[in-house]
Every structure is written in structure tokens, then in C-alpha cells.
Image: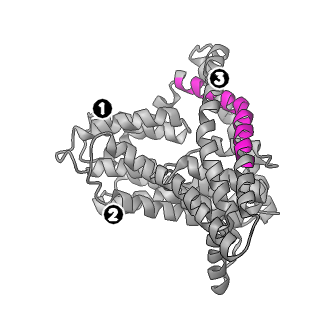
Amino acid sequence: MINILWAGMFLSAIVGALYQLIFLHNYDIFSQITNAIFQNAQSAVEISIGLIGILSFWLGILKLIENAHIAEKISQKLTPLFKVLMKDVPSNSPAISTVVLNMAANFLGLDNAATPMGLKAMEQLQEHNTAKDVASDAQILFMILNASSVTLIPITIFMYRAQMGAAHPTDVFIPILLATSVSTLTGFLLVAIRQKINLADRTLLKWLCGFVLLILALTLLFLNLAPAQRLALSSALGNIILILLLGSIIYISLKNKIKCYEVFVDGAKEGFSIAFNILPYLLAMLVAIGVFRASGILDIIVDGIKTLCSWLHIDTQFADALPTAFMKPLSGSGARAMMIETMQTFGPDSFAAFASSVIQGSTETTFYVLTVYFGAINISKTRYALKYALLSDLAGILAAIGFAYMFYSN
């Protein structure tokens, strides 16, 4: 999929450039495309180098989280819930604890730990699957929760916003939390209704009501504030939670007699290699997107959406953030590059950049999650998994656009 997408952007850009040259007599179009290649290639290098410090810091913190077994402690609290959700899986199955560990790692933003745990969980769930080439109910639920999982602190988005020069990188904290909660809740309810999960179960009801009430309370709180106050409070809450989380991690590490400094430094060392490993992927996507935009095709698509919205008397500001939404279900690296390119084009503090950041954090990369998780255990019949995952994506993206309007202030 990503190969076709990447090649398609280049080839369609060339076709678009030829059209402009022959029919519109735009003799500068190929020069513009060449400049876009050089500029975006340079930007990819600058961004990757700039990420070294921030990446190293958070990898050091994540190493402390792993050594302090924080994800495991969270999993102990969540295990009773997943025993209710995955009713076809025996309560003594190791799959339950692995699933919970994966969800806890996702919640904490531990992507490196979440994927191996997720693959392991799929293998263990497969042991209870009677039709080995058909996704079971438990596997579908697990995949959709992964594809729309709530992340408490969207560190990577904060990181890129800071690198691109946003005045307040964390001001997207609350809108992302609300949008991704809508995505997760939509996916869960669709599956719960299809699988006839008992929503009246006391354990499930307690968690579900708590989750919904929290989202409603946050939404009502921010609805009663002026736009500028919403943004300021979102940024303040993001920073407060971030610092308190750091303090809690360090305190728990000390309590567990972990050598915090040494473990942190050990984790931070990985930041250099990861930053340079990111470079080829970021380079590939940024250059392709730059060429695609320079050719005018991306602008034609966005302008078409704006024209339709104007005809329907709908505000058109959100359209400039839609390329990130189009890319998100297909490619995580592509959506990230599209978000960065939007910041470069419109400015890191523009509405388009703000909205694209919220969209980026609203959901996961559906096709990647589905392909990797089901492909690892040779499941070819995914039943309704893709349809429900894409509906969850749609709900998350629409919510992201709505919350971006609600929170953004010039």
C-alpha cells in the first residue's frame, strides 16, 4: 500500500506538471517541483537532527517506565475489564494479561513496547480461535481498540510541534484526548453491539460510565470557556500532567530502588540511532508530498473540497488539514510527514497546523495495524474488522475537526 501511495504521488505530480506545461503554459512548474525536492530534503535532515534531544529525553523516560513495571501495574487494574470484554477467551489464559499490557503500553505512549506485546497477544488469542484463517471476536475487538487506542500524552505530536516552532506545543493536548476518545468509544460500541457484549455488566459499566463522564465533563468545562481560555487551559493541563507524570515515574522508580540516572542515560542513548533511522522515511514522504503539492494536484483536491463546502455554506478552513486525514488510515509516516508539511506551508500556529495535529493524534494507522496484527498469524478473513476500524477513524477525524474549531484561537 505505502509503495503504491509513494510512487503514485510522484507519478501523478509529473502528469499534473505536464498538464500545466502543455495546456496552462506554466513554464516554471518543473523548476518549482525541483525546488520542492531540494527544500523538503533539507527540511527532513534538519527535523531529524532537531529531534535527537527530545527523542533521547523521552526514550530515557520510557526506559524508566519499563524498569519500574508501570505498564504491568496498570494492567492489573484493567484485567477484570478485559475478562468481561473477551468472553470467549478463558479467564486463566495468558492472552488476557498480554492484551492488557499492550493496551497499557499504548495508553502510556510506549509504541516500541506496544507492538511486540500486541503481536504476542494475537498469537495467544489465536490459540483459542477455532477457525485459524478467520479473525475471532476477541481478535477483532483487540485490533479495533489498538487502531483507535487512547494515548494519555501524545508525546510525538508535542515533539514535532516544538521542533517546527509552535508557540505552545502542548495546546493540542485536550482536543487530541477528546478526539481519540470519540474514536475509541465509537469502535468499542460498534464491536460491542455486533458481538452482543453485555454493556450492563457491572465491571464494564463502571469503566464505560467513568470514561464517558470524563469526556463529557471535559467537553462541558471547555464549552463554557472563551476560545482563548480553552487553548490556554488545554496547554496548561498538558504541561501540568506531563510534569506530574514525569515526577510520578521518577518517584516510583526510586521507590523500586532503580538507579534512575543510569537507566535514563541507557535509554537516552537510543535517541541518536532512532533519530537517524527516522530520516530515510521522513525524507521519502516529505519529498513526495512536496512534489505532490508543488505540482498543484493537492491544491486542486483541497480547493475542490473548499468549493463544495462553500456551496453548502460550511466553513472551509478545515480543508487545508484534510491531507493528514486522508493519509492517516494508510500510513503513519505519511500522515506525520503531511502534518509537518502542513506546518511548513501554513505556519506551526495556523489553524491548518493545529487541526492536522489533532487529526494526527485522533486515531491510529488502521491498514498498518490490521496488516501487521492479522498477517503475523496468517488470518486472511478479517470479517467486519476493517469496516468498523474505518468508521472509528471517520468518527475520530470528524471529532478532531470539531474540537479544533472549538479550541483554536488566533
First in sequence: mark 1 vs mark 2: 1
Give the image location of residue 374, x and y in percent: 33, 45
Residue count near mark 1 (Cα–Cα under 10 Å), binned few <14, some 14–19, many ≥20: few
Q: CA distance from mark 1 to mark 2?
A: 26 Å
Label 1 sits on what residue type? Pro
Query: Which residue has dot 2 on it?
Result: 193
First in sequence: mark 2 vs mark 3: 2
Give the image location of residue 352, x and y in percent: 71, 62
Circle 1 — which element?
Answer: helix
Q: Do the residues under discs 2 and 3 have CB atoms within 8 angstroms?
A: no
Query: Which residue has dot 1 on it?
Result: 94
Q: CA distance from mark 2 to mark 3?
A: 44 Å
Query: Which residue has dot 3 on it?
Result: 268
First in sequence: mark 1 vs mark 3: 1
Residue count near mark 3 (Cα–Cα under 10 Å), binned few <14, some 14–19, many ≥20: many
Residue 57 drawn in magenta: yes
Majority secondary structure of the magenta segment?
A: helix
Q: Do the residues under discs 1 and 2 have CB atoms within 8 angstroms?
A: no
- Image quadrant containing the C terminus: bottom right
Up-down relation of residue 235 to residue 91 (above or below): below
Please report the residue visible at 59 percent of the width from the left and 44 percent of the height from the top. Answer: 152
Q: CA distance from mark 1 to mark 3?
A: 32 Å
Label 2 sits on what residue type? Ile
Please report the residue visible at 34 percent of the width from the left and 59 percent of the height from the top. Answer: 192
Residue depth check, mark 2 versus mark 3: number of the one nearer the observer: 3
* 330 or 177: nearer the viewer: 330
Report the span colored magenta.
Answer: 39-66
Q: Do the residues under discs 1 and 3 have CB atoms within 8 angstroms?
A: no
